[in-house]
Amino acid sequence: MSENTLAAKEETQLQKNNAPLAPTQEEISVLNGTEKFGFRLTHLMNQGAWKKFWTFCQRHLGSLWIKICTYNLMNVFGLENFEKADVERPLLLVANHRSFFDMYTVSSVIFRETKRPITLFFPVRAKFFYTQPLGWFVNLVMGWWAMYPPFFREEKEVTKREFDKYSLRRLVQICSEGRGSIIGFHPEGKRNLNADPYELLPAQPGVGAVIMKAKPQVIPVFIAGLGNDLPKQVLGNWTGGEKVRIWFGEKVDLSDFYEKSDRLRTHKEIGDFLMSKIAELGEKDREKFGKS
């Protein structure tokens, strides 16, 4: 039996047992020592008793300080759409991306204003968060290790992208199974630095690739009013900063896409469709808050 066939059989068995997938020796060998340690540490923190402990910290500590820093500014719409989602199936939240704090703020809202079980995962670019100890520390204090799994696609060393094959499989697994699993995803792929919050970047096909394989529940989210200057953002809560607005859309029906072939073109079409749903929420925000 070939090594690839054996690996495929082992992966299938792991999926059946709901155990977290692990990278092959070939995939992890492309990382340097620091990156390997950063991955293995974060991988451990995202399973079993450790994941339950960090989720407890997210719910009772992380969400609290975000609440304290935003309570005068926060405006939330459509949260009932989130609450109506099936807790037995993973839920993918697809949102526009303008600030480092987008998903942190969304997580605070769902932890503090809903009662449903929540286990968070935020797939992230590996650069910084997995390439140096300071990145590990930021993942701990800001995300309680939830920035996982990592993707190395933007690393200059092309060989490191071999590891992304594993990260994609792991993300598909997370989006396929797990009671209460919530995955935060930015289809744009990077922060949008355009001055106009309603001018969105094109979708990247990655979100479509994950959705085609995992078929999770999907809800669009539009976020506005958050900046990237942390001291200014925090002080704005008491000095009249811009209102923070979070809009949760209705769960989207992607069944028409599932009838198409699983290829790059379909993945891009799914991403574009989801960005159109996010844009619709943006128009609601423009109408309500009079932003031009």
Image (cartoon, grey):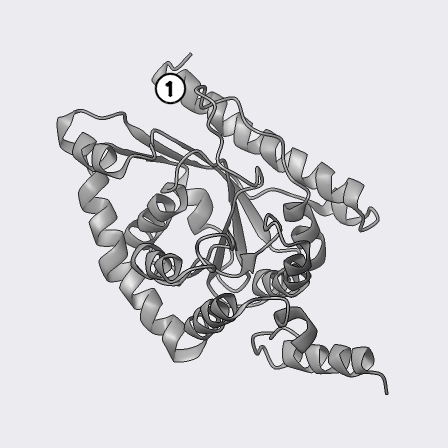
The x, y position of residue 123, in whole percent, is 52, 55
When asked about the image quadrant of residue 285, the answer is top left
Q: Nearer the viewer, residue 62 or 83?
A: 62
- When the figure is inspected, residue 128 is found, relative to residue 278, above or below; the finding is below
Q: Nearer the viewer, residue 128 or 124?
A: 128
The residue to which callout 1 is attached is 288
- The quarter in which the N terminus is drawn is bottom right
Q: Residues within 10 Å of mark 1 (few under 14, many from 20)?
A: few
Up-down: is 84 above or below 204? below
State the residue at coordinates (22%, 46%). 67
Residue farthest along the bottom direction in this orientation: 1
Q: Nearer the viewer, residue 74 or 201?
A: 201
148 left or right, relative to 1: left
Residue 288, compared with residue 151, is above or below; it is: above
On screen, residue 285 versus residue 268, left or right, reads left
Judge left or right: residue 214 versus residue 228: right
Residue 202 x/y as whole percent: 62, 31
- The quadrant in which the C terminus is found is top left
Q: Secondary structure at mark 1?
A: helix
Instruction: Report the residue at 42% width, 60% height from top.
Output: 132
Q: Is residue 249 above or below residue 158?
A: above
Would you identify the image quadrant in which residue 27 lies? bottom right
Which residue does the image show at 42% across and 50% down from the upper left? 83
Amino acid at circle 1: Lys
> Residue 137's spot in the image, x, y percent?
33, 61
Residue at 35%, 48% (x, y): give it.
104
